[in-house]
Image (tube, rainbow, N blue to C red):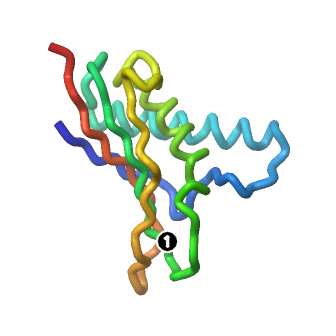
Amino acid sequence: MSVIVELPYARPPLTENQRMHWRKKAAVVASVRQAVYVLARNARVPQNCAHVDVSLHYTPRDVRRRDADNLVPTLKAACDGLVDAGLVADDTPDLMTKQMPTIHPAEKGERGRLWLELHIEEAQ
């Protein structure tokens, strides 16, 4: 089973290159986690699955060069939100595979967007 969860961000809320105060960063992490929790529940993702493969996708609004590994903090917070939603019990490798984020080419005239692709293996 595959599910796409559109995230409410035009650009990644968390990146490796940010230099935020720890309290501000914690608030952003909590916000991303909560947003993904709500979106996953609204998408009616199944509960207590055997395994899920998660990939974060980003289409920026411009053609500047970007590093895919810079998006990993956003992916981590999103995966925690999926665990909070009950998709899997934990985000350990035996239950969840986190793919390297994918950056797609910018689309002229379009705003940036982020989404998660979930490939779910339901429990027997």
Label count reads 1
Within the image, what quadrant is residue 120 found in? top left
Position above or below: 111 against 114: below
Which residue is painted at 72% across and 36% down in the image? 26
Dot 1 corresponds to which residue?
60
Residue 32 relative to residue 42: left or right: right
Query: How packed is label 1: few (under 14 Cα within 10 Å), some, or many (20 or more)?
Result: many
Judging depth in this view, the residue of 86 and 67 nearest the camera is: 67
Residue 62 lies, in percent from the top left, at 52, 80
Judging depth in this view, the residue of 7 and 75 nearest the camera is: 75
Position above or below: 22 against 49: below
Residue 83 lies, in percent from the top left, at 44, 24
**Which quadrant is the C terminus positioned in?**
top left
Residue 94 lies, in percent from the top left, at 38, 21
Residue 91 relative to residue 72: left or right: left
Judging depth in this view, the residue of 97 and 106 nearest the camera is: 97
Which residue is painted at 55% across and 38% down in the image? 76
Position above or below: 52 against 5: above
Local secondary structure at mark 1: loop
Which residue is painted at 82% across and 38% down in the image? 22
Q: Amino acid at mark 1?
A: Pro
Q: Residue placed farthest to the right in the image?
A: 21
Which residue is painted at 51% across and 64% down in the image? 10
Q: Residue placed farthest to the bottom in the image?
A: 108
Residue 91 relative to residue 76: left or right: left
Within the image, what quadrant is residue 1 found in? top left
